[in-house]
Amino acid sequence: MKRRAFIGLGAVSISAGLLHSVGAFSSLSAGRGVVVSAASDPKGILGINDEVYPVEFTNNTDNLSMTVTLESTAISFDVDDDGEFEEPVTFNIDEIKKVGLQGDDGTVSISVNLFDNGSVVGSIDLDRIFEVPGVAAIRQVTGSVTGAFGNGRYEFSLTNESDDVVTLDGFGVDWTDNSNAAWVGRDRGNDAILKAGGTQRIAERFRTNGDVVDVSNNQEITLDGTGVDFEMGRFSNNSGNGVAVNDVDLIVRGSDNPDITVTVELRAD
């Protein structure tokens, strides 16, 4: 079960056993002559929030800098959402640091050093079990435009660059480079609104307003490391006339977590 965890510092070092017993406080003594203030969040010095993705690590002190090291045999980490997963990783936290996860659910060893004017004044060491959400893999879905036509028909390919299988069950369009493109509809002589791998996946036209549309029953699309070709019937204006579109922000949704969507940028060369 996902939860927020806040870790307080009662001395120079804190063990994992204190993770769930830390109470609220306004200040703590971290080392000889050093007072740690947690004015921004009185419940702890290090905040870990895995109710969101990427996971948020928060430095809740207002007078110390913080260095965090994450190590795991099951999980690799993407710091700052730059697409590079590594293990172990070390990073500094001024306020909030966002970290992506890849791999299997597992234990992460977390080591924290607290600094005051460059000198270490405290440390935290603990083990924490993290659940790796499916969105970690979805965020590594990339797209490329394979055909953009004057009548509004649009073709593209999606590739899953993660090591995990991704199943998509919803799509939407959040933006196009043609402000007149109000709908994704049916091309003349083509019954499909959205095809993938040559099979119809969405049969009803939908607006380009950011809403996510469910695929038809049993028409989910699996991305397992190879590219899948897609075709949109055509983009049209409010009068039903086809309009040319080159660039699209496509929204995709994974079947394992309906509350999380990811935007894939499709850009014609």
Image (tube, grey):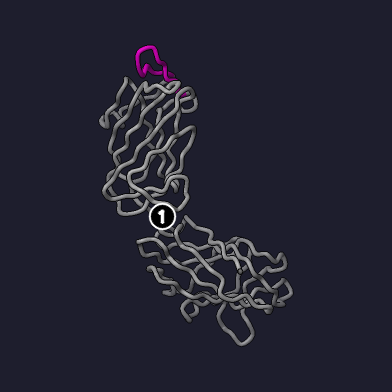
Within the image, what quadrant is residue 246 found in?
A: bottom right
Residue 141 screen position, x and y as percent: 46, 62
- Count of all numbered marks drawn on residues in the image: 1
Q: Viewed as shown, does residue 211 lie left or right of 59? A: right
The residue lying at 43 percent from left, 23 percent from top is: 118
| Disc 1: CA contacts within 10 A as few (<14), some (14-19) or many (>=20) | some
- Badge 1 amino acid: Ala
Q: Secondary structure at mark 1?
A: helix
Residue at the far top: name it.
33
The residue lying at 71 percent from left, 76 percent from top is: 240
Residue 99 inside the magenta-drawn segment: no
Q: Is residue 129 above or below residue 248?
A: above
State the predominant SS element of the stretch in magenta: strand
Decide which of 6, 178 is in the foreground and name it.
178
Residue 245 screen position, x and y as percent: 66, 71
Decide which of 256, 161 is in the foreground and name it.
161
Q: Is residue 238 above or below residue 103?
A: below
Q: Viewed as shown, does residue 150 lie left or right of 37? A: right
Residue highlighted by disc 1:
136
The residue lying at 45 percent from left, 46 percent from top is: 52
- Give the magenta-colored segment's residue range: 27-38
Q: Is residue 60 above or below residue 262?
A: above
Q: Viewed as shown, does residue 111 lie left or right of 91? A: left
Residue 106 screen position, x and y as percent: 28, 48
Residue at the far right: name it.
239
Residue 37 inside the magenta-drawn segment: yes
Q: Quadrant of the C terminus?
A: bottom right
